[in-house]
Amino acid sequence: MDQEILNRLLTAEKKIDAIYIAVNKTRKYILINAIITIVMLLLPILGALLFLPTVLNGLDAVTGNLSALDIEL
């Protein structure tokens, strides 16, 4: 009887260890996924913040510095 209980405890311990490893892999996968998602959202925003003023200045130069306030009706 004691040997049967010991065998069951050892089996349960092996299963718990396997579950622990699987949970750690899942946690790392979710963490990496979250980091990649944040980076993929922030890079275009930062790029737009850095690149948009240059584009607007170039557009302003091409249009001849026209603005809505300079137009007289």
Image: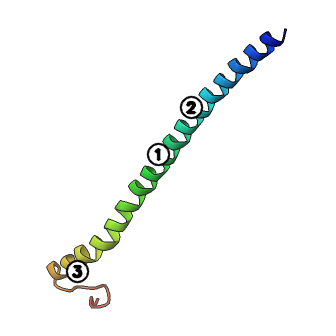
Label located before the other in sequence (2 or 1): 2
Please name the amino acid that badge 2 sits on. Answer: Ala
Furthest residue toward right:
1
**CA neighbours of label 2 inside 10 A, class few (<14), some (14 to 19), many (20+):** few
Across and down, in percent, residue 9 comes to 75, 20
- Name the residue located 69 percent from the left edge and 25 percent from the top edge: 13
Question: Which residue in the protein does label 3 denote?
Answer: 57
Residue 22 shows which numbered tag? 2
Please name the amino acid that badge 1 sits on. Answer: Asn
- Name the residue located 46 percent from the left edge and 52 percent from the top edge: 35
Residue 48 shows which numbered tag? none
Q: Secondary structure at mark 2?
A: helix
- Name the residue located 16 percent from the left edge and 84 percent from the top edge: 64
Of tags 2 and 1, the one toward the viewer is 2
Across and down, in percent, residue 71 comes to 27, 88
Question: Which residue in the protein does label 1 denote?
Answer: 33
